[in-house]
């Protein structure tokens, strides 16, 4: 149930008063900085001047994050227009390209950082520093879960490792601890840590656990009575109680045996390149069906390889990352639609920054906070539109620029929340997800 519904609408001043278009959000995050000029941002200028020195003119200074700027580099992938909207997409994404008429593209996003850690924090929490609540934690804090046995905020990291910033990417920060992201390691023997007693603890039975929980409940009640102004215990109790309910629901949730062979093939579970991301996209759909409010699926671990941080070899590295993500992401969109979930679910695809239009080394690309692309699909979104435009090089955002603050403001608005009103007092400051920035991108709303 929505936290606002539990307390009554008048007790939730952060609601904007309009009808929420979205009940749940699933975010696909491309770890490392997905190259916009090799995926969605087609620039003929790169083809025309391939191999020539990069010179944006007007004496503009050209710098790169960790390299010397190289020559203009065209995309190694072929480009074509797709759908009735005629949206350009590269051949690296043959599956997602079939769905462009359902998407709204933000073609001129920019980040104030081109360093992975700070830029990732910006795109997940609205701040470059650690310690601030992730977007999922804010949403959990405001709205709660749609079911009492599923966490509101769940995150599904890559099987090869956590993203940049590790578990702090999913933190509740200064919000109550029960709003932090519940981590599910989909391919691990124990997908959810500490869900069951260790196998060698045969003395722990269902009856003994219930007796222990009852003692704990009595002790917690005494502790709470003695400290009426301290909400930390209540948050911890709520977290433990949810964990107990999750112990009962998780086996069914994580068991894909009930899924048809057709569904498993749709998500690419039958192929080694797509199996991991496909499994997690399928689990995301199952979580959304069962009441999760905000689900993150990460493509790639943190670090200099096996993700979207393609400094060395765009054809090989980005090609592999795209192949692993493309089919499962398209399957999730199609599956949500055919099950009727897309009517009140928002799907977001994003990354921390983009890549440079010139080469690093031979065929790599360096970090670029100047412009990147995100897209949204589903409830409340105008399908088949694009907002913003980068310059002729895909070097800098040029027109109708948007930021992570704007993206977060828009997500909250679709959930019924005014981003300027959703605040939490911390160290004498009324903090919010969008800091002191952000506007709702109404140009992409239906």
Image (cartoon, helix red, strand yellow):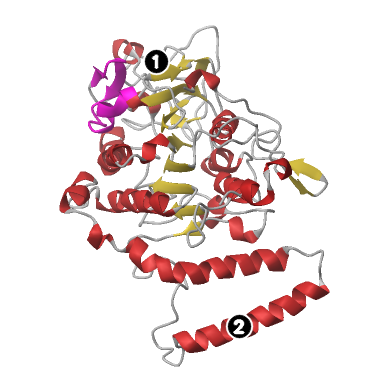
- Residue 417 is situated, as x and y percent measured from the top left of the image, at 62, 36
Label 2 crowd (10 A; few <14 / some 14-19 / many >=20): few
Distance, label 2 to label 1, CA atoms, is 71 Å
248 w.r.t. 46: above or below: below
* Residue 339 quadrant: top left
218 w.r.t. 2: above or below: below
Q: Is residue 33 visible?
A: no
Q: Nearer the viewer, residue 243 or 353?
A: 243
Residue at 56% in and 28% down: 403
- Residue 314 is situated, as x and y percent measured from the top left of the image, at 31, 33
Tags 2 and 1 touching, CB below 8 Å: no
- Residue 425 is situated, as x and y percent measured from the top left of the image, at 77, 47
What label does residue 230 carry, if any?
Answer: none
The residue that mark 2 highlights is 214
* Residue 203 quadrant: bottom left
60 w.r.t. 128: above or below: above
19 w.r.t. 105: above or below: below
* Residue segment shown in magenta: 79-101
Mark 2 or 1, nearer chain start: 1
Residue at 38% in and 22% down: 383
**Which mark is in front, 2 or 1?**
2
Residue at 61% in and 65% down: 238
**Residue lying furthest top in this view?**
58
Q: Nearer the viewer, residue 137 or 445?
A: 445
The residue that mark 1 highlights is 53
* Residue 409 quadrant: top right
Q: What secondary structure is marked by label 1?
A: loop
Q: Is residue 350 visible?
A: yes
């Amino acid at each position: 149930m929505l936290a606002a519904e539990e307390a009554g609408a008048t007790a939730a001043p952060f609601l904007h008063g309009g009808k929420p278009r979205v009940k749940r959000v699933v975010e696909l995050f491309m770890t490392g900085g997905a190259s916009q000029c090799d995926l969605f941002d087609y620039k003929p200028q790169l083809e025309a001047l391939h191999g020539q020195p990069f010179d944006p003119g007007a004496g503009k200074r050209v710098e790169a994050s960790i390299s010397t700027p190289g020559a203009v580099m065209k995309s190694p992938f072929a480009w074509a227009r797709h759908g009735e909207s005629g949206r350009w997409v590269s051949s690296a994404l043959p599956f997602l390209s079939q769905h462009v008429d359902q998407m709204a593209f933000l073609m001129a996003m920019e980040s104030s950082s081109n360093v992975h850690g700070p830029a990732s924090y910006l795109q997940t929490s609205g701040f470059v520093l650690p310690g601030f609540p992730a977007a999922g934690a804010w949403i959990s804090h405001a709205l709660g879960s749609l079911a009492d046995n599923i966490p509101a905020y769940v995150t599904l990291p890559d099987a090869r490792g956590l993203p940049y910033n590790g578990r702090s990417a999913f933190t509740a920060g200064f919000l109550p601890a029960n709003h932090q992201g519940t981590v599910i390691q989909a391919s691990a023997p124990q997908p959810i840590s500490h869900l069951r007693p260790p196998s060698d603890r045969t003395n722990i039975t269902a009856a003994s656990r219930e007796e222990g929980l009852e003692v704990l409940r009595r002790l917690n009640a005494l502790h709470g009575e003695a400290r009426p102004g301290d909400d930390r215990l209540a948050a911890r109790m709520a977290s433990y109680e949810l964990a107990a309910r999750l112990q009962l629901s998780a086996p069914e949730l994580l068991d894909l045996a009930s899924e048809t062979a057709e569904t498993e093939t749709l998500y690419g579970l039958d192929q080694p390149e797509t199996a991991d991301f496909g499994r997690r996209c399928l689990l995301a759909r199952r979580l959304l069906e069962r009441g999760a409010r905000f689900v993150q699926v990460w493509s790639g671990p943190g670090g200099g390889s096996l993700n979207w941080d393609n400094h060395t070899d765009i054809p090989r590295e980005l090609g592999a990352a795209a192949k692993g993500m493309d089919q499962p992401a398209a399957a999730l969109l199609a599956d949500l639609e055919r099950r009727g979930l897309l009517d009140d679910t928002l799907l977001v695809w994003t990354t921390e920054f983009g890549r440079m239009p010139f080469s690093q080394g031979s065929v790599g690309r360096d970090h670029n906070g100047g412009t990147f692309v995100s897209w949204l699909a589903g409830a409340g979104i105008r399908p088949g539109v694009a907002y913003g435009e980068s310059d002729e090089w895909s070097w800098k955002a040029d027109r109708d620029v948007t930021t992570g603050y704007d993206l977060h403001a828009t997500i909250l608005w679709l959930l019924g929340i005014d981003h300027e009103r959703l605040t939490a007092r911390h160290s004498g400051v009324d903090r919010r997800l969008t800091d002191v920035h952000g506007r709702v991108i109404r140009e992409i709303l239906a």
